[in-house]
Image (cartoon, rainbow, N blue to C red):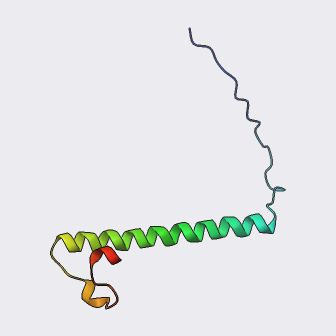
Amino acid sequence: MAEHIAASTPVVADPTPFTLPETQRRLLRWTLYVGYAALTAGIFHGLAQALSYAGINILSFFPALRSYYQA
């Protein structure tokens, strides 16, 4: 027999008056910025790795890098 367990989390009827302090909003904003920057870097590094395995050398466009692993 299955028992029904009532949810212990209260439901907010009207969330409109809820606001975050500016310091917390700034922290959340920077967390999103860093996350998107890391995602963008990961996409480019994944593309560079795929091209490297395909035999296409893109390191000639980046003179400071001597090998794939320096990126």
**Among the 4 quarters of the image, the one containing residue 66:** bottom left
Seen at 66% across and 69% down, the residue is 29
The x, y position of residue 60, in whole percent, is 25, 89
Q: Is residue 30 left or right of residue 52?
A: right
Q: Position of residue 34 (x, y in %)?
A: 56, 70
Side (left or right) of 3 relative to 40: right
Looking at the figure, which quarter contains the N terminus? top right
Q: Is residue 12 left or right of residue 34?
A: right
Q: In the image, what residue occupies the spot 29% across and 90% down?
A: 61
Can you name the residue that lies furthest to the right here? 17
Residue at the left extreme, as displayed: 55
Place of residue 42 in the rendered image (x, y in percent of width and height, measured from the top left): 40, 68
**Quarter of the image where the C terminus is located:** bottom left
Give 41 or 14, whichever is nearer the viewer: 41
Quadrant of res 11? top right
Q: Is residue 60 above or below residue 12?
A: below
| Residue at 18% from the left image edge and 79% from the top image edge | 56
Residue 24 on image: x %, y %: 75, 64
Query: Viewer-proximal residue, 49 or 67?
Result: 67
| 48 in relation to 18, above or below | below
Drawn side of residue 11 relative to residue 47, left or right: right
